[in-house]
Amino acid sequence: DILGCPPSCFTLPSDEQEWILEPLCFPEQPATDIGTNSSSHHDMEVVTCVLCSHSAPLSEKDRLLKHLVLVHKLVIADVKLIADFPKYMEYWKNRISEQPITDFCSVIKTNSQGPVEKQEHYFLLCDVLPEDRVLREHLQQKRLEEILEQQQRERDDDSFQRICMFCNDEFNGNRSSLLNHMAREHSFSVGLPDNIVYCVEFLDHLQSKLDNLQCLYCEKTFRDKTTLKDHMRKKQHRRINGNNSEYDCFYIINYLELGKTWEEVQSEDDREMEDEDDDWSDWQAHPVCAVCLFCEQQSESMEKIYTHMEETHGFDLHKLKTELNLRFYQQVKLVNYIRREIHQCRCYGCQEKFGSKPEVIRHVMEAGHVMQLPETSTWDQPQYYFPTYENDALLCALSDSDSESEHTGPWRDVPVIAEDISNLKVLKQTSVLSHLLKNTDSSS
């Protein structure tokens, strides 16, 4: 991830291109940093770049990550899953000072088929590297230990004092007295007290929403407190939205495993249960909406989206796939390229720049550039492997050409990361093949 978003969310540089340095999502699924701990007491801690003396407060982490991309062409994957970013940066600053950065990072060459002078190399630091994975897991374990200690302090704290958000009753002593009161008297429950951490900050956050006349569940804003109160009562909105990730940092379950939310941790119990019934007839998958390349039209049916784009905009992806003999990953790159160009208000056919998205769409239609693609080398580039929009369901509908053989399949272009062969001698000695050969020799 770059700046906490997928590697796909950045645009590689050229003199004419803008940068996309924030995650892009379609409206139905707003982009959020899951697990962002708003209660952190370390926001003012200074973090230093791993390759130079540039630094920034932890609260401005995005600015430092932007510096890494723009100045050093270094991308750190899955930033939002790093439990202790300052410690992570400190570790790699020391390691990179000892060895070349290429010993740790995957190298991505941009504009690989263009002139040499326009080619650039980017460095990707991610947990594919065993050392990076171990570091992330260690930091996660340390964070979990700190959170459990914090939770225990709150459990034992008898100096808690606060007035109920829904009435004027004041509570002193243990936090559980207030939480149980809200659940019992006001039908507002945030869960068991022992499952909560940073309780004071949690209650401050909820109180702030109420002070701003926001419903705690749907977060709609109302004109006065009376209207808000009636809304929450009639709509049964006396609860928080469990799907809102801004609350994740206040529940201990979200700190248990690296990169897993409470929903994923809970669902593991179901996967571990023995089920003798193999009947999947009642399975219902969650519908996924695909979004048109040119407008806001959405549909759960991929064929409807294809039909819409063809009839409304004159764009026939099936025809392009056939005429250009596009393999699967070429289709992926083409869709991502078009998405990115339109996002940057640029015609993908003639590269003319416009002031807004509606203007560029109008131009594409009126100029007849809908089916006019630039040279293949322009969009058939490694950077377009990554989705421009991280929830782009249209990519899931792409398929291989029927005429492709196994030798020309999509995996021909898939980047392959070599396994760790740093200790090749040990690998050979412990190889299963070597044991088989020894057994064969002894039997003969």
Image (cartoon, helix red, strand yellow):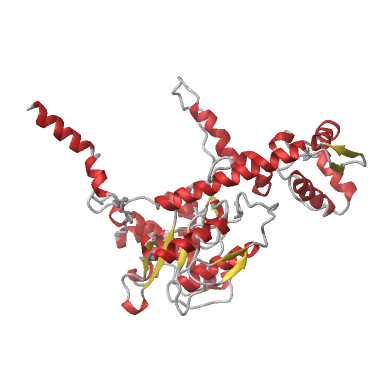
Q: Quadrant of residue 199?
A: top right
* Figure disc tally: 0
Rendered residue at 46%/27% (across/down): 280
Q: Nearer the viewer, residue 25 or 436?
A: 436
Which corner quadrant of the image does residue 102 belong to?
bottom left
The reply, left or right, for residue 287 in relation to residue 181 is: left
Residue 187 as seen in the image, left or right of residue 389: right
Counting from the top left corner in percent of width and height, residue 152 is at 70, 38
Identify whether 443 is placed above or below 330.
above
Residue 25: tell me if it is visible: no
Q: Nearer the viewer, residue 32 or 24?
A: 32
Q: As drawn, which residue projects farthest toward the top? A: 276
Query: x and y percent of residue 179 in the render?
Result: 80, 36
Camera-nearest residue between 380 and 322 = 380
In this view, which residue lies farthest toward the left? 444
Q: Could you tell me if residue 399 is visible in this image?
A: yes
* Residue depicted at x 52% and y 57%: 88
Residue under the image location 45 percent in, 69 percent down: 73
User: In the visual, does 159 lie left or right of 339?
Assistant: right
Q: Residue at x 36, y 50 (%)?
A: 399
Report x, y in % for residue 113: 31, 71
**Quick check: 305 above or below 69?**
above
Q: Where does the image place residue 315, in percent across and percent down from the top left?
A: 44, 62
**Which residue of the protein is positioned furthest toward the right in this rendering?**
168
Q: Is residue 248 above or below residue 5?
A: above
Which quarter of the rendering shows the C terminus?
top left
* Residue 370 falls left or right of residue 4: left
